Image: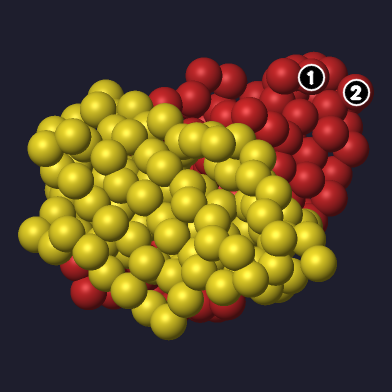
Chain colours: A yellow, B red
Amino acid sequence: GENVEQHPSTLSVQEGDSAVIKCTYSDSASNYFPWYKQELGKRPQLIIDIRSNVGEKKDQRIAVTLNKTAKHFSLHITETQPEDSAVYFCAALRVTTASKLTFGTGTRLQVTL
Amino acid sequence: DAGITQSPRHKVTETGTPVTLRCHQTENHRYMYWYRQDPGHGLRLIHYSYGVKDTDKGEVSDGYSVSRSKTEDFLLTLESATSSQTSVYFCAIRGSGGPSNEQFFGPGTRLTVL
């Protein structure tokens, strides 16, 4: 089955700096890669996703890049703000009828003032 | 919140007792999922359902069973709870629009097995 590795497990940046979280996946047939943000005590929520026919996608201060050859994808957050502090999860999915997501182990991002 | 609720939200139980968690959705989605979340492991799929009475195992299904007798309800049962099943349990539904559509999560159930 699919295996997703995520690094780093914790990340501390100063407000205004950029943050990068990286994930690798094992199944070359995976073709959908969502990123979820989970604030303390709350449910995970989708913040951005990318499909395998696209190399990069941007939404305001967040962007995701995908390298299918190397089987890795990354989340980039620019101009970080305190409200960006949360745990971020990457995931991979091979689009089939059931579409089961495999998640990375999470990155705790702390944005300091 | 995509109309997903979970009950109970918190539960403390003792080893060996049966426990049932309920996921309820109001938007008639076909696909529903149960995950557990543990530090250092992220979210791991326990079981999922692709229709009434249609369920299948995920990666960590041992010790768990599920049932779906109505579209809106997906039940997760721990037949005989163990301390290793102490976790936060999230239900999710897959939005309409296709297999790669967003999964929406419920608010979670924190289960402690003493």
Disc ID at residue B25: none
The chain holding disc 2 is B
Which quadrant of the figure has residue B40? top right
Looking at this view, is B2 or B51 the one in front? B2
Whether residue B70 is visible to the viewer of this picture, yes or no, is no
> In this image, B83 relative to B105: left or right?
right
Which quadrant of the figure has residue B29? bottom left
Q: Which residue appears at 70% of the width and 42% of the height?
A: B88
Whether residue A27 is visible to the viewer of this picture, yes or no, is yes
Identified by mark 1, the residue type is: Ser
Q: Measuring from the top left, give residue A98's x and y in whole percent.
A: 25, 48
> In this image, A94 relative to B71: left or right?
left
Q: Which residue appears at 27% of the width and 40% of the height?
A: A72
Looking at this view, is B9 or B76 the one in front? B9
Q: Which residue appears at 42% of the width and 30% of the height?
A: A5
Which quadrant of the figure has residue A101? top left
Kindly state the secondary structure of the residue where label 1 is placed.
helix
Which residue in the rendered view is the most extreme toward the bottom?
A: A60
The quadrant of the image that shows the C terminus of chain A is: bottom right
Separation (CA) of disc 1 from disc 2 = 6 Å
The chain holding disc 1 is B
Circle nearer the N terminus (1, 2): 1
Disc ID at residue B83: 1
Identified by mark 2, the residue type is: Leu
Q: Measuring from the top left, give residue A43's x and y in whole percent.
A: 64, 61
Q: Which residue appears at 55% of the width and 36% of the height?
A: A8
Which residue, given by chain and number where applicable, does mark 2 sit on? B114
Q: Measuring from the top left, give residue A91's x and y in whole percent.
A: 38, 46
Marks 2 and 1: in contact by CB < 8 Å?
yes
